[in-house]
Image: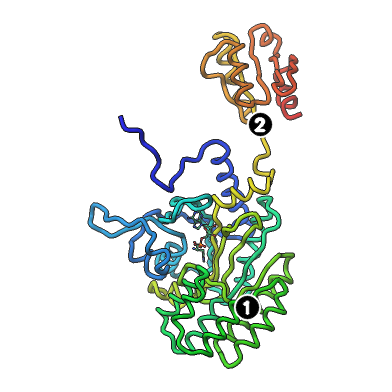
Amino acid sequence: MPTFQTVRGMRDLLGQEAQIVTSIIAKAQETASLFRFKEVFTPHVEYLELLSAKTGDEIRQRMFIFEDLGKRQVALRPEFTASIARLVTTTLRTEPKPLKLFSAGTVYRYDEPQRGRYREFWQSNFELIGVDKPEADTEIILLTNKLLQSIGLSDFAFKIGHIGIIKGILSQDGIDEKTQNTILQRMDKKEYSLALKLVDSEKCQNTLQSLISINGKDWRDVVEQINVLVVGYEKAKAAVENLVEVLTLVTASTEISLTVEPAFARGLEYYTGMIFEVYIPQLEIALGGGGRYDRLIEAFGGEPTSAVGCAHGIDRTAIAIQTQNATYLTKAKVSVVVIPITESVKVDALKIAQSIREHGVSAEFELMGRKMGKALEAADKHGFDYAIIVGERELCEGNVVVKDLKKHEQSTVLIEELFEKIKK
Ligand code: HAM
């Protein structure tokens, strides 16, 4: 028999790893509800044409593409945004705006596997559709800030830019959209000299070169420096003004750590406005990112519709939690195992396990039918807090024996007082 392994870049998640993913999704759902985003589920498989339309080469070249049995070209979703834009142009076409949609699940990219980079990974995704005002960009940043805070992370910082600054300069220089995208992709990979090679005019090259060297935490100061450089570039100036509006709102609404980087670009092609990523100092890879994309829905055949959104990498957030020893997610809940001493008390023991669960405490029933000693040994090994030992003699008096496996103490407790005892 061959020994099967998971496909390269895909992982089984077991035990605590699985638990952390579930807990992060629960936090994302809570955040969605706090900001009034509605959860939607879309398919893992979509038409290739949809997924590749506006994502850009970076993602297009990394998709898992296949032909289904009906000879349709389909692919595993590399992100959620295209599926949500499809929804907005079809089923939700006439829904009143703003639309606020949340999803969580796995996405697929043929990335080079390494720590924090997988071919199947989890994202929580938020899209705010139908608002062109900077308040919407602000909400997306505030939401990300809130989510990471509620997960227990500290020291995370936002990198914020605006794709309209570079695009505005390039388009005024007569550079076509396709070349603009190639330049931005190179800039995203920090291949600045390769990017600048595609720019003919010296003035434009110098302006971009200066923008690349600017970044800082004092956003007003950074904006002043950018404003000096974009004199004469009307579209770029408008982009800076828009960025200022967003930054003013964000910093006035919450305490947030951010750096402004005018030459920052992202791997996805559909962005038209503010873009951001979020990092912790201990990891070089982004925990999340997003931005404004005002032309995607129109490109998919919908009405011209403004939109802004973000996605958070759940696997990377899990690494961040472990790196920072954030404890909230791993805080253990009380767990109990119920062990019947004899066959005759099996039903009573099952009922006791059930009533413990009804009180919201997780209870395992000793299913293997082991003798007391072995069952207690196994319970200890699996880290249970309590063993509830159900014996005939105690039952006759309405009691069970509760063994505290952590303190190595045991006492006889009335069944109706059992829950109070465990809770303590
Ligand atoms: P993205 O930056 O491509 O944006 O992905 C968002 C997050 O997914 C990243 O910040 C990272 O944490 C995680 N991620 C990306 N690739 C991998 C990988 N190979 N392994 C593990 N984690 C990964 C988007 O996907 C956009 N759709 C976000 C968006 C929504 N923009 C507007 N709306």
**Which image quarter is the N terminus in?**
top left
In which quarter of the view is residue 31 placed? bottom right
- The residue that label 1 is drawn on is 243
**Residue lying furthest top in this view?**
393
- Which residue is drawn at the image coordinates 42% and 54% (left, top)? 108
Q: Position of residue 57 (x, y in %)?
A: 39, 68
Give whichever of 372, 98 is nearer the camera: 372
Could you tell me how far apart the alpha carbons at marks 2 and 1 are, in whole angstroms? 51 Å
Q: Please say if 78 is above or below 183.
A: above
Secondary element at image label 1: helix
- Which residue is drawn at the image coordinates 64% and 56% (left, top)? 147
- The residue that label 2 is drawn on is 359
Determine contact: label 2, label 1, CB under 8 Å. no
**Of circles 2 and 1, which is in front?**
1
Neighbours of disc 2 within 10 Å: few (<14), some (14-19), many (20+)? few
Q: Position of residue 183 (x, y in %)?
A: 46, 76
The amino acid type of the residue labelled 2 equals: His
In which quarter of the view is residue 419 placed? top right
**Which image quarter is the C terminus in?**
top right
Q: Position of residue 323 (x, y in %)?
A: 64, 48
Q: Please say if 15 is above or below 100.
A: above
Give whichever of 48, 181 is nearer the camera: 181
- Which residue is drawn at the image coordinates 65% and 43% (left, top)? 329
